[in-house]
Image (tube, coloured by chain):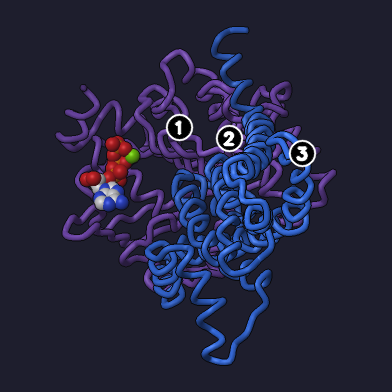
Chain colours: A blue, B purple
Amino acid sequence: MSTLELMADSFLKILLPGIRMTIPLTIIAFSIALVIALLVAMIQYAHVKVLSEICRFYIWVVRGTPLLVQLYVVFFGLPDLGIIIDPFPAAVIVFSINEGAYCAETIRGAMEAVPKGQMEAGYCVGLNYWQIMFKVVLPQAFRSAFPALSNSLISMTKDTSLAANITVVEMMMATNRIIARVYRPLPLYIEVGIIYLIISTALTALQRAGEKRLRRYEEAEVKIHAGV
Amino acid sequence: MLECKGITKSFGALEVLKGVDISVHKGDVVTILGPSGSGKTTLIRCMNFLERADAGTITFDGVTYDFASIGKKEIAMLRKKTAFVFQEFNLFLNMTAIQNVMVGLTTARKVPKEEAAKRARAALERVGLGDRADFYPGQLSGGQKQRVAIARAIATDPEIIFFDEPTSALDPELTGDVLAVMRSLAADGMTMLVVTHEMSFARQVSSHCIFMEGGVIVEEGTPEQIFEHPVSQRTATFLKL
Ligand SMILES: Nc1ncnc2c1ncn2[C@@H]1O[C@H](COP(=O)(O)OP(=O)(O)OP(=O)(O)O)[C@@H](O)[C@H]1O
Ligand SMILES: [Mg+2]
């Protein structure tokens, strides 16, 4: 089989696991990660006693250990304790927890960058803490955290290839299986790389569009200052 | 209407307020003058609980609270009867002008949306910015931002508005519009407590002037007394500058 024929023949065999596993894994894990991150960031922002210590510990552990080790601990390690989790849910758990820690730091940083006067003005117009949080601080923090969060999403999409190590049949695993059969690693690894590249490019385009939407009012400001 | 007694406040070892008494009657425009660092900002921030005073009492509409022991609920209740205009405007950056004015009505006071919009529009008209309702703070000049902040303050019908140097962050040519709005509020009988360096405003508009230095009130009285016949040498020196 010629190289091109091989690549054409394998295309769907790699893409389908991507659609069945890589994309759902990314979407589900990243959504859960955002919820975790939001909770952790809000706890830390408010300096809630004990809980914020726990959050600090969580972030310290997750950021200080390799993702691959975390996957192994959950998938190969926990069965020792009688906790057996299927590959896909195990991957969802690990990626959510891992990404949650990084996104928590991003969101907390963005919340802390909201000027203190916004909070004070909120109190002065009669809002309570939660109202200020949801109407003022978080919308502004989300706006400034959006580019970094999008980057995290794109990195995570690529990192899901590590799930192959715990037997999730995502694109990397699918590619490896074909290679084991035909023994033509170079074109097939390049092919899976190209598919990742297409997905990343699509996400980057979405990110651009999102950033543009969020920046609408700042652009208007620039126009006014330029006297247009 | 509003009376504070014996306010003290320290930041660490620095004693910023050393026992300040201040009272504001309904319809008064009280201005606070004084050199930089004398504690003016700290004083009005304490009066609206943005800083926690170490000691002293506040009497609002006949009810007295102790700064040291007042609870969150009472603070929230008192804040709903007051408004605060900041030197740096502090408009909500993610909201348009009208949303800035409305949020205190809809979210904080549960005023129905349509009525809130009507009142917010009226408040914006009042400060001459009816045509800027849908602009974001980033699209407004400093003077316009401060007028939106004043609209936000008056929209909730507060019993008193605190102003902390409302024109100090503005280019000189933009202070006029803001001062004009404040004059017109004063003429309408709005109760205001104003920290300012605008001497002519203090002189012409206030019903009562307070001169502060080093965390104490050095002298107070009518603008004529303070500006024409100050008793204290310090007041005289400051006003001559
Ligand atoms: N949060 C704070 N922490 C520590 N010190 C503070 C704080 N806020 C104010 N101070 C100090 O308290 C003193 C009084 O400050 P304040 O802002 O009340 O003065 P002011 O009269 O408003 O001055 P200005 O005219 O410059 O605005 C200053 O020495 C200032 O450095
Ligand atoms: Mg000040």
The quadrant of the image that shows the C terminus of chain B is top left
Which chain is home to disc 1?
A: B
Specify the amino acid type for callout 3. Answer: Ala
Q: Label 3: few (<14), some or many (≥20) within 10 Å? A: few
| Marks 2 & 1, CB-CB < 8 Å contact | yes
Q: Which mark is residue B166?
A: 1
Label 3 within 8 A of ligand 1 by Cβ? no
The residue lying toward the viewer, choosing from B160 and A53, is: A53
Q: Label 1: few (<14), some or many (≥20) within 10 Å? A: many
Q: Quadrant of residue A34?
A: bottom right
Q: Quadrant of residue A202?
A: top right
Q: Residue at x 50, y 60 (%)?
A: A41
In the rendered image, residues at marks 2 and 3 fall on the same chain? no
**For ligand 1, which image quadrant applies?**
top left
The residue lying toward the viewer, choosing from B213 and B208, is: B213
Residue A214 sits above or below residue B1 on the image: above
Specify the amino acid type for callout 1. Answer: Pro
* Outermost front residue: A1
Specify the amino acid type for callout 2. Answer: Ile
Q: Which mark is residue A8?
A: 3
Viewed as shown, does residue B21 lie left or right of B160? left
Q: Position of residue B73 (x, y in %)?
A: 56, 70
Inspect this view and state whether residue A137 appears: no
Secondary structure under badge 2? Answer: helix
Secondary structure under badge 1? Answer: loop
Q: Which residue is mark 2?
A: B150
Label 1 within 8 A of ligand 2 by Cβ? no
Viewer-nearest of discs 1 and 3? 3
Q: Which mark is residue A81?
A: none
- Of pointers 2 and 1, the one earlier in the residue sequence: 2
Q: Label 2: few (<14), some or many (≥20) within 10 Å? A: many
* Outermost top residue: A228
